[in-house]
Amino acid sequence: MRLILLGPPGAGKGTQAASIVQRYEIPHISTGDIFRKNMKEGTQLGLKAKEFMEKGLLVPDQLVVEIVKDRLEQEDCKKGFLLDGFPRTVVQAEALGHALKKMNVALDKAINVNVDKHILIERAVGRRICKECGATYHITLHPSAKKDDCEKCGGLLYQRSDDNEETVSKRIEVYLNETQPLIDYYKNEGILVTINGQQDIGKVFDEIVVALGA
Ligand code: ADP
Ligand code: AMP
C-alpha cells in the first residue's frame, strides 16, 4: 500500500499514522520527524530546517524533496509506505509524482483528515510527544495513563517548540495557502478519500480502514 496523509496541523495525521503503519506493515515517513531528528542531532539539515520550523514556515521544497526521494529508494519502501506531512505544496506533489513514475509505482490513496479550523489550535497546543518512542498524546483529549511519562515505554513527554498558539496559527495559515490545494490535486487524480477527523481516535481509524478497502 502506497499512501499519503493530508490534513492541517493538529488534524491527527501522526496519531493515525501509528495505527496505519502497524496494520499495513509499511514504513512511516514523516518529514517533520526527519527534521526534528536532524535538529536534535545538530546536523546541517537540522540547522537549516530549524530556521523555518520555528517560524511556522515550510522548509524549502528542494530540500524536502531530495530527502523524500532518497528515503523512498530504501529497501523497506518496496512493500509500500505512508508519507505523513509530505507533500505540502503542489511543487512537492509533482516531484513525488515524477519520482514514483521513475520507480514504476503509483500512490494508492491520499487520505485527507478533515477537522474544523477552530479545534486545531487546542489539539496542537495540548500535544505532548514521547522523547523515546515518539508516541503522541494530548493533555486533556488523549492523556497518557502515566501522566507526564509515556504509557507505552515510560519515556518523558515533551512539548514541541512550534506547538505554541502563535506558531500554530501561522502553520494553519500556511496550510490553507500552500497545502489545501492538494485536496483538489489528488481529487483530480482520482485517489482522494476524505475522513472525518472529528471523532474518537479509534473511529477515525475505522473509517480509514474502510476507505482503504481492507
Ligand atoms: P498532526 O500529525 O496532524 O499534526 P497529531 O496526530 O499529532 O496531528 O494530533 C494532534 C493532537 O491532537 C495530539 O495531541 C493528539 O493526541 C490529538 N488528537 C489526534 N487525533 C485526535 C482525535 N481524533 N480526537 C482528539 N484528539 C486527537
Ligand atoms: P509536522 O511535524 O508535519 O507538523 O511538521 C513540522 C514542520 O516541519 C512544519 O511546520 C514545516 O516547517 C516542516 N515540514 C515538515 N514537512 C514539510 C514539508 N513536506 N515541506 C516543508 N516543510 C515541512
Image (spheres, rainbow, N blue to C red):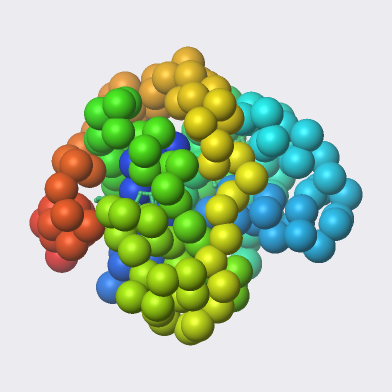
Left or right: 29 as drawn, with respect to 193:
right
In the rendered image, which quarter is residue 10 located in? Answer: top left
Which residue is situated farthest in the bottom direction here? 153
Whether residue 62 is visible: no
On screen, residue 61 versus residue 46, left or right, reads left
Decide: is 3 above or below 188.
below
Residue placed most toward the observer, 102 or 1: 1
**Quadrant assignment for the C terminus:** bottom left
Q: Work out which quarter of the rendered image holds the N terminus and state it.
A: bottom left
Q: Position of residue 7 (x, y in %)?
A: 36, 37
Number of numbered discs on residues: 0
Whether residue 63 is situated above or below residue 129 in the rendered picture: above
Q: From the viewer's perspective, is 194 left or right of 111?
A: left
Instruction: Name the residue at 57% across, 60% down.
Output: 158
Relative image position of residue 154 (x, y in whole percent): 50, 82
- Residue at left offset 44%, top offset 37%: 9
Q: Is residue 9 visible?
A: yes
Question: Left of 205 or right of it: where is 28?
Answer: right
Residue at 69% over, 35% down: 54
Most extreme residue toward the top, as rendered? 177
Along the line of sight, the residue nearer the viewer: 172 or 31: 172
Q: Residue 26's spot in the image, x, y percent? A: 41, 69
Return the residue nearer the eye: 165 or 214. 165
Residue depicted at 48% across the width and 19% down the height: 173
Q: Position of residue 186 (x, y in %)?
A: 33, 31
